[in-house]
Amino acid sequence: MSNFSLDPAVYPLLIFHCFIGAIAALLAKHKGYNFLLWLILGLIGGTFAFMGIIVMKDQTKESDAAK
């Protein structure tokens, strides 16, 4: 059995990574995308998910324009 331990300095980075992912999910919800899907993507992808949702179009504005 292997003894897997992380350096304590890594924990704040992991917490920040998850925090950025949660912000990406909240932003996705605000733009009209699936919150749960983006939460999963954000917790895995962190900053990349955040950058992805930043460049995506707002679906709520598109649906308002179609009415």
Image (cartoon, rainbow, N blue to C red):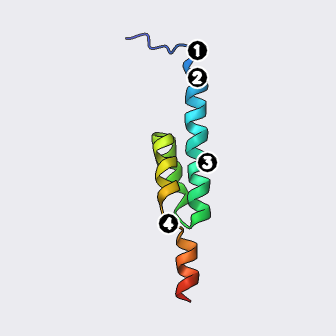
**Mark 2 crowdedness (10 Å alpha carbons): few <14, some 14-19, many ≥20:** few
Q: Do the residues labelled 1 and 2 touch (CB within 8 Å)?
A: yes
**Mark 4 crowdedness (10 Å alpha carbons): few <14, some 14-19, many ≥20:** few
- The residue lying toward the viewer, choosing from 60 and 40, is 60
Q: Residue furthest toward the left?
A: 1
**Residue type (three-letter) at the residue carrying disc 3:** Ile
Judge whether 64 appears above or below 46 on screen.
Answer: below
Q: Under tag 1, what secondary structure? A: loop
Where is residue 41? Give x, y as percent.
Answer: 46, 48
Where is residue 21? Give x, y as percent.
Answer: 55, 44
Q: Are marks 1 and 3 in contact (CB under 8 Å)?
A: no
Query: Which disc number belongs to residue 8?
Result: 1
**Residue type (three-letter) at the residue carrying disc 4:** Lys
Residue highlighted by disc 4: 57
Cα separation, mark 1 vs mark 3, equals: 24 Å
Residue highlighted by disc 3: 23
Cα separation, mark 1 vs mark 2, equals: 6 Å
Residue highlighted by disc 2: 11
Judge whether 65 appears above or below 1 on screen.
Answer: below
**Residue type (three-letter) at the residue carrying disc 2:** Tyr
Judge whether 45 appears above or below 12 on screen.
Answer: below
**Mark 1 crowdedness (10 Å alpha carbons): few <14, some 14-19, many ≥20:** few
Cα separation, mark 4 vs mark 3, equals: 17 Å
Please tell me which residue is depicted at 54% across the width and 20% down the height of the picture.
10
